[in-house]
């Protein structure tokens, strides 16, 4: 069975819209685990737009199975990772202006910086994955710098508009996953996966882990809306009855 890592960044996005205490991503993590999540994924961005340092520290205490920290190749975040010691770290590219992670990490173009980051993480017992595009050179460079796993970026697959374009992207991912496996790398995938499009990715041979966030957080808001409004009506009704 494929592991599902639930990315809860966007619970924190809602909280940060008010810089309030709710909704708490740590509470969401506990509920996701009750729902069967095999792990929790968070991205501690340098601009702290959603997940905060406090969240990461608490998640380390409450996530019993697999805490996966996405981080940029950045000294400040690396130091936090080494201190907190999540089970797994996934190195991702990061640009301030982007709405979400736009492309894979360029391992080829910054080989030595990635290598030393991978080494530092591994030296304290953190398993390391690299988030890359389905590109042969990036897979080989990932192996070369000592990564143990690759998370393939499925964003282009998710954005493909036609059935043909989607099939082409699946084929690209399948070939890259085969190469990664031959190199002895674990294969993860993620970004832009939804209830409708996850099937083709889950069926790619050798996929061990999927990291999915936005679609799950979106659905959880919708499934909870009716109940949340009913509870507020009850609270008002009860106040008037007193
Ligand atoms: N995997 C990685 C490396 C990511 O950066 C993200 C987005 O933070 C995800 C998975 C989850 O993507 P989505 O929120 O689109 O499901």
Image (spheres, rainbow, N blue to C red):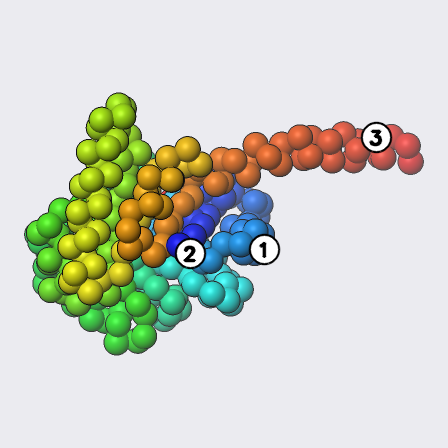
Residue highlighted by disc 3: 237
Q: Are marks 2 and 3 in contact (CB under 8 Å)?
A: no
First along the sequence among labels 1 and 3:
1
The percent coordinates of residue 47 (x first, y second) are: 33, 47
From the Cβ of disc 1, is ligand 1 less than 8 Å away? no
Decide: is 96 above or below 162.
below
**Residue 64 as seen in the image, left or right of residue 198:** right
Front-most of residues 240 and 1: 1
Percent from the top left, x then y, of residue 39?
45, 58
Q: CA distance from mark 2 to mark 3?
A: 47 Å
**Which one is closest to the eye, mark 1 or mark 3?**
1
Residue at mark 2: 1
Query: What residue sits 22% from the left and 62% below the top?
Result: 185
Give 41 or 240, whichever is nearer the viewer: 41
Position of the N terminus by quadrant: bottom left
Would you place residue 173 above or below residue 218 in this image? below
Task: Examine the rendered structure and indicate whether residue 214 appears above or below residue 80.
Answer: above
Dot 3: few (<14), some (14–19), or many (≥20) neighbours within 10 Å?
few
Give the mark nearer the N terminus: 2 vs 3.
Answer: 2
Write the residue at 52% across / 35% down: 219
Determine the secondary structure under disc 3.
Answer: helix
Task: Give the x, y percent position of residue 141.
Answer: 11, 58
Residue 181 placement, left or right of 189: left
The Cα–Cα distance between marks 2 and 1, rounded to whole angstroms, is 18 Å
Residue 235 bears which disc, if any? Answer: none
Foreground mark, 2 or 3? 2
Q: Nearer the viewer, residue 216 or 239?
A: 216
Q: Position of residue 62 (x, y in %)?
A: 53, 64
Q: Identify the residue position indicated by label 1 in the image.
A: 34
Q: Residue furthest right?
A: 242
Kindly tell me whether residue 60 is visible in this rendering: yes
């Amino acid at each position: 069975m494929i592991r599902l890592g639930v990315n809860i960044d966007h619970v924190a996005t809602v909280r940060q819209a008010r810089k309030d205490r709710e909704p708490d991503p740590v509470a969401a993590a506990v509920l996701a685990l009750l729902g069967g999540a095999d792990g929790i994924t968070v991205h501690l961005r340098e601009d702290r737009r959603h997940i905060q340092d406090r969240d990461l520290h608490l998640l380390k205490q409450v996530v019993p199975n697999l805490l996966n920290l996405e981080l940029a190749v950045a000294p400040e975040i690396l130091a936090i990772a080494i201190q907190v010691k999540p089970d797994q770290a996934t190195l991702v590219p990061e640009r301030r202006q982007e709405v979400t992670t736009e492309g894979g990490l360029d391992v080829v173009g910054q080989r030595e910086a990635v290598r030393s980051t991978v080494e530092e993480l591994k030296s304290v017992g953190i398993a390391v994955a690299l988030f890359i595009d389905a590109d042969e050179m990036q897979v080989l460079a990932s192996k070369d710098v000592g990564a143990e796993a690759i998370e393939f970026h499925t964003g282009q697959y998710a954005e493909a508009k036609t059935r043909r374009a989607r099939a082409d992207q699946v084929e690209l991912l399948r070939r890259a996953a085969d190469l990664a496996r031959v190199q002895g790398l674990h294969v993860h995938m993620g970004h832009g996966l939804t209830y409708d499009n996850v099937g083709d990715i889950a069926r790619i041979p050798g996929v061990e882990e999927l990291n999915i966030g936005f679609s799950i957080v979106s659905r959880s808001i919708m499934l909870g809306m009716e109940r949340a409004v009913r509870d507020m009506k009850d609270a008002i009704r009860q106040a008037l009855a007193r």
